[in-house]
Image (cartoon, helix red, strand yellow):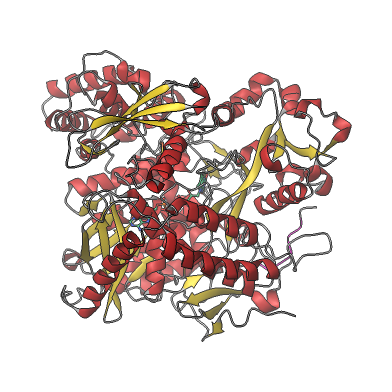
């Protein structure tokens, strides 16, 4: 395949711009990141700076990769991260635009690399169950109804890539936050901290500069793990419940 | 007979002084009782560095924080949640015996020692089996959403040829869910101010002052700044080094730098040649290939492995009639068939491909066929069991396993070797502890499926937090002066090396060297090793390394994010490690577990151990040439036998 990649290039010294690169020998078995690898090899040998992009597992699970491909977070395939996107989904001769996540809480570090540490801050605000090592009862002490376990799992599958934020017109991190609220909030182990968790995480979310949720649903549409939109509904219910009760 | 002499010298034997003797059931209790305790008020004055935030490092940092130590945690990814443990699919073993199917701590212990082909320490493995039970409790308390049955209790499955059902799992994402549990515990300690987190920070050297590990030299991957961190003890939890082979199932950033640098500073490296090659991975599709994807082992429960009987058969799989197919595993191993252990399945695939009967691009693949299973169980049932795996396969290859057989080929997956540690998980450098895949401790020459997650969490949640106190009880140690000659030397070595890499400005990329190193390792130190091949590799590797330092091209500068520079440093260390892996493989003339020496096989082609000669851990000291220290292994509980799966 022949392709033109129109890639966002930005260093600490400039405001960034799109640059076109031609590739003449792309195999349709390549993953999208492998195409960037090939381009980078060429750039290095030509004495240019390679394109910086984040990646690690290349299996769609670590959440490290992430870029806007033709304006869509992670590209055209549903439920697929950029690293799992293969070139057979593109037409020969296509021009593909590649840009970093764009959201206020995610400053660009270089080229396609952004700083997503705001997501860690949200978890630190309360996205856990306090269970210090050694304090646990037997795992079978509490049975968890299978439907609850399944709901928890569905949300726990979030890989923290930030696509939801990048796709949201408001730059909201609500799907990410709601995924953790749902995961922990439906489990019996998560009940004691349920109120404080939602209050603290939502406050952190807002303080970090993420936008508000207006239910556009763009987030779920691009989520590589299909975290459902109704988790946000659950977050809102939990938030209301927690705000109405005296904080203990 | 040839010998490996000249490639190494032999030093004093080494022993593990920390494991108590006597009844194996109470060794861990007695060790904990014998270990010194740190007064709670003193913990606040003690600092521990933990490098790595995978299952091992994440759980250790969180637990040490809970105990009241000051913890500094490091990882190279942008968030601790992305450590490579996240990719583990299958599950985690624990001797809960919830199924009442005859499992016990003793059975898990026995299976692990035997599975490791009698090259692991009994004391360590017994403790691992004991702790396995607590791990599941701990993870459930954190909210890890393990698979459950309709009654609400935990589901288990059997895995990796075990005859009991002891593997706990969370769909195909067990590693992810366990890691998020540890990450969240870590996040809680970060918020509490007990752990100081340094993401996008790479450890480039260990600082040893007055014989004790006292800190690390790191590079901030965003600013490029090189700096030091000091502590009373250093814990390495930096994972495995499978990427020495370039292509593996590991994440792209997995590296040996942390443990290799520690090795150069005096920590012995144990059994570096023990590598696990997983039989069911998606084959290489071309030169551009950047990593290999594992397909869960569970597929072998229903898939049948075959190749054409005739070499060079270019027909499509479905056009090859039944009579012209060779179901070689079923033929050679009638009682275990497609379920033989990983090492055997991998080697058998290599053999048929070497005979020219492999399928797919380059002839490096075998079929894993579900046609029979679909006929027998129906498509819906097969989809329910393997749907997500089939989808993943189709995503990568563009082929639907419901219609055409999958193509699979073995790939490097896990490294059993690592830094030598005693029962306390302490290396030969006082104050340096090593946990998780980075150490060599529990799996001998072959790891059983679902046991790495167990080991990482056992080390991090339960073993290290108990044993590190014995060392720290003598602290806090004198404050390290950053002008100390050992410190300035370590920093300038790191800076000089970065400068040297940038200055070469040659005409080959880092990746091209890494790929070539990988080819050499795969060819000569992979599934089957021979004296001749290893000797050849020991000529090729130093020559390539020399060429690397002459011709590599690393663009950009030392400041700011420079991913080529990061890779260059890692590959430079892989070169050195790869050579030691080959020396280790050359010296171990027996076959055992994942280490198959073609010269040492039974008449029917099985791995042949030599217990009289090689029942030891090979612990290597850094020197030119390396020095071998043997730790003799004794088996009081499990009698070594030759494995047979016929
Ligand atoms: C695809 C795949 C599937 C697997 N499936 C299973 C399974 O089903 N069951 C099972 O038991 N095992 C499985 N394994 C094995 C298991 O996942 C690993 O052995 C285990 O997770 C390793 O954990 P760890 O904590 O030791 O290291 P890792 O999780 O690899 O973590 C390493 C950490 O060290 C950091 N690090 C590394 N080098 C540096 C450096 N120089 N400076 C700073 N930080 C550094 C990294 O950032 C990371 O945080 C699988 C492995 C793979 C590859
Ligand atoms: S690189 Fe890990 S999800 Fe893409």
Residue B40 percent across, percent down from the top left: 20, 65
Is A201 in the magenta? no
Q: Is residue A107 left or right of residue A160?
A: left
Q: Nearer the viewer, residue A113 or B195?
A: A113
A22 in relation to B117, above or below: above
Is residue A140 in view? no
Residue shown at 41% from the left, 35% from the top: B145
Name the quarter where the N terminus of chain B is drawn.
Answer: bottom right
Q: Is residue B484 left or right of residue B236?
A: left
Q: Nearer the viewer, residue A52 or B350?
A: A52
Residue shown at 71% from the left, 42% from the top: B363
Quarter residue B421 falls in: bottom left
Residue B208 percent across, percent down from the top left: 29, 75
* Type of secondary structure dominating the magenta stretch: loop
Looking at the image, the residue that sits furthest to the right is: B323
Q: Which residues are magenta?
A: B637-644
């Amino acid at each position: 395949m022949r392709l033109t990649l129109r890639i966002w290039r930005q260093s600490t010294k400039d405001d960034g711009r799109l640059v076109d690169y031609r590739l003449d020998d792309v195999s349709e078995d390549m993953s999208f990141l492998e195409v960037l690898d090939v381009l980078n090899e060429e750039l290095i040998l030509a004495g240019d700076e390679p394109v910086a992009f984040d990646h690690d597992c290349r299996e769609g699970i670590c959440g490290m990769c992430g870029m806007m491909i033709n304006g869509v977070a992670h590209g055209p395939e549903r439920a697929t991260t950029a690293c799992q996107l293969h070139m057979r989904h593109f037409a020969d001769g296509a021009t593909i635009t590649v840009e970093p996540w764009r959201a206020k809480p995610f400053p660009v570090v270089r080229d396609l690399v952004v700083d997503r540490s705001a997501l860690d801050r949200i978890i630190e605000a309360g996205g856990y169950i306090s269970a210090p090592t050694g304090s646990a009862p037997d795992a079978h002490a509490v049975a968890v109804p299978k439907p609850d376990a399944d709901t928890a799992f569905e949300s726990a599958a979030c890989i923290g890539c930030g696509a939801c934020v990048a796709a949201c017109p408001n730059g909201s991190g609500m799907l990410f936050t709601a995924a953790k609220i749902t995961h922990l909030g439906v489990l019996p182990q998560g009940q004691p901290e349920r109120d404080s968790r939602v209050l603290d995480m939502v406050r952190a979310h807002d303080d970090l500069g993420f936008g508000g949720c207006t239910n556009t649903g763009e987030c779920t549409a691009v989520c590589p793990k299909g975290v459902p939109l109704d988790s946000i509904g659950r977050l809102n219910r939990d938030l209301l419940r927690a705000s109405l009760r005296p904080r203990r | 007979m040839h010998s490996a002499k000249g490639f190494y010298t032999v030093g004093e034997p080494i022993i593990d002084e920390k494991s108590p003797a006597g009844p194996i059931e109470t060794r861990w209790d007695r060790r904990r009782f014998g270990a010194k305790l740190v007064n709670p008020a003193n913990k606040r004055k003690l600092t521990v560095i933990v490098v790595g935030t995978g299952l091992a490092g994440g759980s250790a940092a969180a637990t040490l924080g809970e105990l009241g130590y000051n913890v500094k945690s490091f990882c190279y990814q942008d968030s601790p949640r992305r450590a490579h443990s996240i990719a583990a699919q299958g599950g985690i073993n624990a001797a809960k015996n919830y199924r009442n199917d005859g499992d016990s701590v003793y059975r898990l212990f026995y299976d692990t020692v035997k599975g490791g082909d009698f090259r692991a320490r009994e004391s360590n493995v017994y403790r691992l089996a004991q702790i396995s039970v607590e791990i599941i409790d701990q993870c459930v308390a954190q909210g890890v959403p393990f698979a459950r049955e309709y009654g609400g209790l935990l589901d288990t499955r059997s895995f990796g040829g075990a005859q009991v059902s002891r593997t706990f799992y969370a769909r195909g994402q067990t590693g992810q869910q366990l890691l998020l549990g540890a990450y969240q515990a870590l996040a809680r300690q970060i918020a509490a101010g007990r752990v100081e987190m340094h993401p996008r920070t790479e450890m480039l050297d260990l600082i040893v002052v007055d014989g004790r590990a006292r800190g690390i030299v790191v590079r901030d991957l965003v600013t490029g700044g090189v700096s030091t961190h000091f502590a009373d003890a250093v814990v390495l939890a930096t994972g495995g080094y499978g990427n020495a082979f370039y292509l593996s199932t590991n994440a792209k950033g997995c590296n040996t730098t942390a443990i290799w640098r520690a090795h150069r500073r005096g920590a012995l490296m144990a059994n570096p040649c023990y590598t696990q090659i997983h039989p069911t991975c998606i084959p290489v599709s071309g030169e551009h290939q950047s990593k290999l994807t594992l397909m869960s082992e569970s597929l072998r429960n229903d898939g049948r492995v075959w190749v054409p009987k005739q070499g060079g058969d270019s027909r499509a799989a479905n056009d090859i009639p039944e009579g012209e197919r060779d179901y070689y595993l079923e033929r050679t191993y009638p009682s275990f068939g497609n379920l033989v252990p990983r090492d055997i399945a991998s080697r058998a695939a290599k053999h048929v491909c070497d005979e020219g009967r492999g399928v797919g691009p380059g002839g490096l693949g075998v079929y894993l066929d579900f046609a029979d299973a679909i006929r027998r169980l129906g498509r819906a049932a097969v989809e329910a069991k393997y749907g997500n795996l089939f989808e993943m396969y189709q995503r990568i290859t563009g082929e639907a396993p419901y219609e055409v057989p999958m193509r699979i080929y073995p790939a490097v997956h896990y490294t059993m070797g690592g830094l030598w540690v005693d029962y306390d998980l302490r290396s030969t450098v006082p104050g340096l502890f090593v946990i998780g895949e980075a150490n060599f401790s529990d799996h001998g020459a072959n790891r059983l499926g679902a046991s790495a997650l167990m080991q990482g969490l056992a080390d991090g949640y339960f073993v290290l937090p108990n044993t590190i106190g014995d060392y720290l009880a003598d602290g806090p140690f004198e404050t390290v002066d950053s002008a100390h000659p050992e410190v300035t030397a370590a920093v300038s070595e790191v800076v000089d090396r970065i400068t040297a890499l940038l200055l070469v400005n040659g005409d080959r990329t880092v990746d091209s060297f890494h790929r070539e190193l990988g080819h050499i390792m795969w060819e000569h130190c992979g599934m089957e090793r021979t004296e001749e091949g290893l000797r050849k590799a020991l000529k090729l590797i130093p020559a390539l390394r020399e060429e690397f330092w002459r011709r590599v091209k690393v663009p950009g500068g030392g400041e700011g994010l420079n991913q080529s520079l990061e890779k260059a440093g890692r590959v430079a260390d892989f070169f050195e490690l790869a050579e030691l892996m080959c020396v280790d493989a050359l010296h171990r003339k027996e076959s055992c577990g994942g280490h198959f020496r073609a010269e040492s096989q039974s008449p029917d082609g099985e791995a042949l151990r030599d217990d009289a000669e090689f029942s030891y851990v090979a612990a290597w000291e850094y020197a030119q040439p390396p020095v071998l220290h043997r730790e003799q292994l004794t088996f009081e509980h499990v009698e070594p036998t030759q494995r047979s799966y016929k």
